[in-house]
Image (cartoon, rainbow, N blue to C red):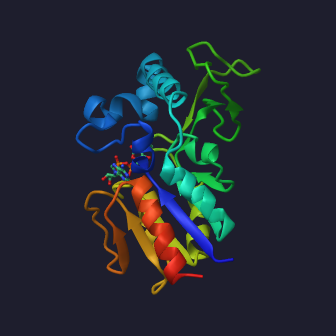
Amino acid sequence: MKKLVVLTGAGMSAESGISTFRDSDGLWEKYRVEDVATPEAFAANPGLVLDFYNQRRNQLYTCKPNAGHRGLAELEQDFEVHIITQNVDNLHEKAGSTNVLHLHGELTKACPVDDVNTTYDILPGQEIHLGDTDRRGVQLRPFIVWFGEAVPMIEPAIRKVEESDILVVIGTSLNVYPAAGLLNYARRGQPVFLIDPNEVNTYRKDIHYIKAGASEGVGQLIQLLKKTVR
Ligand code: OAD
């Protein structure tokens, strides 16, 4: 089976009702990154940061995978599909994708502030509050890669892209590194598809651009793959 690697961003989940970050109605229009998404913000005002992620998590529980997520899961019948997502939601998993790498962490997990390698599942309805600690008494934080922090999953993500036969990019403005740099690792000449309703600036000229939202775009991708790649 051909190896199909898919890099997804916030646009993948937009049709499920989750705001993107940089569109005109995006989250970063309502909040400042430096207030809620950096280690310095957490040190200065942990309650505000915990509340921001509690809200994001509570909202996630009201959302369902869209046809785009489901289409990617169905592609596992014909391809070895590897999802690399910048999203912290769990909608790829809920749609049935079995191979999902989270570059920027997961909303449904917590970790102690001194050890991002130890994670705990947060059950539906649970939140993280000041005073919630692990067994050692160390405060818990959201398992999210904040701006300025290392991205430990980037190395396995690079290897997946290097080994891919087909690369698909969906719903990311490609503004945030190192994730945006993953396109560099696709071999020259291999099929690269990009699904986004808006123009995305990329230095690669060999991209097959599908100008559509995630649900419609994945539908078009599946048709194209049936015709062109086997
Ligand atoms: P952005 O908000 O930067 O980009 C969202 C992309 O989705 C844009 O290119 C939109 O055109 C596109 N889009 C909008 N609606 C869509 C739809 N229905 N279907 C498909 N695409 C659609 O989000 P990301 O690129 O994911 O990191 O942002 C990357 C990182 O920046 C995030 O992981 C997050 C953020 O700050 C952290 O919080 C660490």
Looking at the image, residue 222 sits to the left or right of residue 180; the answer is right
Give the quadrant of the C terminus.
Answer: bottom right
Give x and y (percent) for residue 47. Answer: 47, 16
The outermost residue toward the right is 135
Residue 95 versus residue 168 in the image, above or below: above
Quarter assignment of residue 198: bottom left
Residue 28 versus residue 179 in the image, above or below: above
Q: Which of 127 and 154 is in front in this view?
A: 127
Residue 24 versus residue 139 in the image, above or below: below
Give x and y (percent) for residue 191. Answer: 47, 79
Give the quadrant of the N terminus.
Answer: bottom right
Looking at the image, residue 31 sits to the left or right of residue 78; the answer is left
Looking at the image, residue 190 sits to the left or right of residue 212; the answer is right
Residue 55 versus residue 213 in the image, above or below: above
The outermost residue toward the top is 131
The outermost residue toward the left is 24
Asked if one can make out residue 151 in the rendered structure from this viewpoint, the answer is no
In this rendering, the count of numbered labels is 0
Give x and y (percent) for residue 134. Answer: 71, 22
Quarter assignment of residue 91: top right
Q: Which residue is drawn at 42% across and 31% down?
A: 40
Q: Which residue is drawn at 53% across and 37% down?
A: 64
Give x and y (percent) for residue 215. Answer: 44, 53
Q: Which residue is drawn at 67% across and 56% down?
A: 99
Asked if one can make out residue 59 in the rendered structure from this viewpoint, the answer is yes
The outermost residue toward the bottom is 189
Q: Nearer the viewer, residue 40 or 16?
A: 16
